[in-house]
Image (cartoon, rainbow, N blue to C red):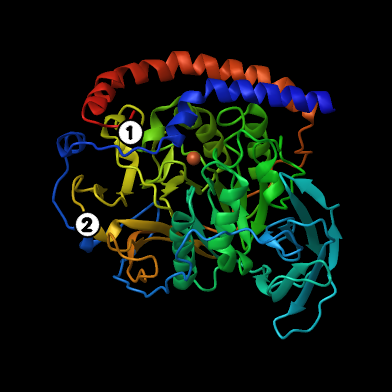
């Protein structure tokens, strides 16, 4: 078994090398400037509008939602310096996370780390402080990259209940946090962020402020989706910065984590060790985890787009079976890399491969909504099926970035790697250079959109309401304790559908053995290579003049 794991690791290493072009694009920190001339040539649209007018969009078979101006005050984070973030070697719990694991009405997965080798204890009470006797299974405390990893799986909790909890060793505990269990009705509220991808405390704090703003707007959110790239290089230092900045938010959240390419792609098991997820159906766990869960009347599948550059045949099969094994009204997919984007990573084979390989599965399974990250901008498609607008299709949302690293539009991708007829909204939230496309105007800009992006999603029976917001940046040169006060709604749409229509069509075993996964690697690579030569390369070559032009104009490749 160990040899098979090593073999898979070797194959994944090869995949990493094959994908080096794509991953290097993600690692690139440069600022890409596209001239206004270039940016305006790809879209010939009608009237011009200012961003303050905000988008009112009709999607699918839906109603129109009027977007109102909203301004909310968010307290500044108190941390202002790059102070040491790691506690002295002791049993103090750090990097505490509560994640979905199993039945969301009764279960949670908890992880924390200590610098000392100490025991694991989780205490849970009701909101009133009354002790709760849940079933808690602890894994053995193990050393991981210089820290000690504690994991506990909690089952047997009451549905629809807010709990207090703390973790520790029986003597020394964390502060009390809270989480909530699903009450089993047909409503669910959650928030979503993406791509904080910071490497210093200041930028992690900016991301944490955006996450806190999401809860400010939706205080009854039942979980927070993080669409990946939690850190830049997945080092102990960065995860501790992440912990320092996000601790308050994380302590009182249930997290749905998605593996980004920066979350340990080069160091096996980082992501799987950071979170106590249900890995029973994951096709592999070396560089991320795929899993699924129910909440409210929705079924959610989380993909691992680090799997063989973007996605293996094994994971595609898992997704198809997973989505066909639910009769929940809503089918939603979370993933890191985006099939549809106008960001700088959209020109590489992985994005186009996802358009070709993944979307046909989503079409066949009736998935309603896909949320992704990776290209640090906000983009939303119309409901599409077979690559064309179709009211019975899937809406794809590239969820913007909560962090400080933001991407402009690569207009040369339009109508080559992405058919702009399917676009419904595009918000570029970058300080210094902003493009905004609302279906009418390609080149309007507004500083209100220069900030961190977060999203709120509310499902109530047959209606899904999606709102996207920007937490405006501090003014340049402002001290870190300057409050970020302005939250602007930058996009909004609703979906409506008849409930009780989905049927279970798959009832088999949806697990993948290591040998099955390995046997699928070769055809997965063959399929990827065939596609890359036959379809991606010709499209890429068409873009070469534009790419050269962008380099000449001090753009970044
Ligand atoms: Fe990424």
Q: Which mark is residue 446?
A: 2
Q: Give SS at disc 1.
A: loop
Q: Give SS at disc 2.
A: loop
Q: Quadrant of residue 71?
A: bottom left
Question: Pointer 1 and pointer 2: residues touching (CB < 8 Å)?
Answer: no
- Front-most of 412 and 245? 245
Q: Quadrant of residue 321?
A: top right
Can residue 91 be spotted in the picture? yes
Can residue 497 be spotted in the picture? no
Q: Position of residue 384 (x, y in %)?
A: 42, 41
Q: Position of residue 17 (x, y in %)?
A: 56, 21
Q: Quadrant of the C terminus?
A: top left
Q: Position of residue 67 (x, y in %)?
A: 31, 66
Q: Residues within 10 Å of mark 1 (few under 14, many from 20)?
A: some
Compared to 36, does 296 lie above or below?
below
Query: Could you tell whether 484 is left or right of 291 in the image?
Result: left
Compared to 414, does 535 lie above or below?
above
Q: Single out the mark in the foreground, 1 or 2.
A: 2
- In three-dimensional space, the C-alpha distance between marks 1 and 2, rounded to whole angstroms, equals 25 Å
Say which residue label 1 marks: 419
Q: Position of residue 194 (x, y in %)?
A: 48, 51
Residue displayed at 71% across by 44% down: 145
Q: Residue furthest bottom?
A: 128
Residue displayed at 81% across by 80% down: 131
- Front-most of 126 and 421? 126
């Amino acid at each position: 078994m160990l040899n098979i794991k090593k073999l898979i690791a070797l194959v994944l290493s090869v995949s990493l090398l094959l994908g080096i072009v794509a991953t290097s694009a993600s690692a690139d920190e440069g600022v890409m400037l596209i001239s206004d001339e270039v940016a305006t040539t790809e879209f010939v649209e009608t009237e011009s509008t200012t961003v303050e007018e905000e988008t009112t969009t009709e999607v699918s078979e839906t109603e129109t939602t009027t977007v109102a101006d909203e301004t909310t005050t968010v307290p500044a984070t108190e941390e202002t310096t790059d102070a040491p973030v790691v506690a002295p070697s002791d049993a103090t719990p750090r990097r505490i996370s509560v994640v979905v694991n199993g039945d969301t009405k009764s279960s949670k997965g908890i992880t924390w780390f200590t610098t000392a080798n100490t025991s694991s204890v989780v205490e849970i009470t009701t909101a009133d402080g009354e002790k709760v006797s849940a079933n808690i299974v602890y894994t053995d405390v193990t050393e991981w990259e210089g820290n000690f990893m504690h994991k506990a799986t909690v089952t047997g909790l009451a549905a629809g209940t807010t709990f207090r909890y703390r973790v520790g060793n029986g003597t020394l505990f964390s502060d009390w946090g809270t989480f909530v269990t699903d009450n089993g009705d047909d409503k669910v509220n959650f928030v979503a962020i993406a791509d904080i991808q910071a490497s210093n405390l200041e930028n992690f704090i900016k991301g944490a402020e955006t996450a806190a703003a999401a809860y400010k707007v939706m205080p009854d959110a039942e979980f927070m989706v993080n669409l990946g790239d939690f850190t830049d290089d997945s080092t102990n230092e960065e995860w501790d910065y992440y912990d320092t900045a996000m601790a308050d938010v994380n302590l009182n959240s249930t997290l749905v984590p998605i593996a980004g390419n920066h979350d340990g792609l080069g160091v096996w098991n980082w992501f799987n060790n950071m979170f106590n997820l249900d890995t029973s159906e994951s096709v592999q766990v070396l560089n991320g985890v795929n899993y699924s869960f129910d909440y409210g009347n929705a079924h959610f599948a989380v993909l691992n787009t680090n799997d063989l550059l973007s996605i293996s045949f094994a994971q595609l099969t898992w997704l198809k079976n997973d989505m066909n094994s639910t009769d929940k009204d809503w089918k939603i997919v979370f993933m890191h890399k985006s099939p549809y984007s106008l960001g700088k990573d959209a020109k590489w084979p992985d994005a186009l491969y996802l358009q070709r390989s993944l979307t046909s599965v989503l079409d066949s399974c009736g998935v309603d909504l896909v949320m992704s990250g990776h290209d640090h901008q906000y983009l939303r498609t119309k409901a599409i099926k077979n690559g064309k607008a179709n009211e019975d299709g899937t809406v794809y949302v590239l969820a913007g970035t909560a962090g400080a690293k933001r991407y402009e539009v690569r207009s040369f991708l339009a109508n080559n790697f992405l058919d702009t007829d399917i676009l419904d909204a595009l918000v570029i939230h970058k300080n210094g250079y902003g493009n905004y496309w609302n279906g009418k105007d390609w080149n309007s800009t507004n500083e209100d959109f220069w900030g961190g992006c977060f999203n709120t999603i509310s499902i109530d029976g047959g209606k899904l309401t999606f709102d996207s917001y920007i937490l405006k940046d501090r003014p340049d040169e402002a001290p870190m304790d300057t409050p970020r006060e302005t939250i602007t709604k930058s996009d909004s749409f609703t979906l409506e559908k008849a409930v009780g229509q989905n049927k279970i069509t798959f009832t088999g075993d949806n697990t993948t053995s290591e040998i099955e996964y390995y046997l699928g690697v070769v055809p997965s690579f063959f399929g990827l290579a065939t596609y890359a030569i036959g379809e991606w390369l010709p499209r890429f070559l068409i873009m070469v003049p534009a790419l050269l032009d962008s380099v000449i104009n001090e753009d970044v490749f």
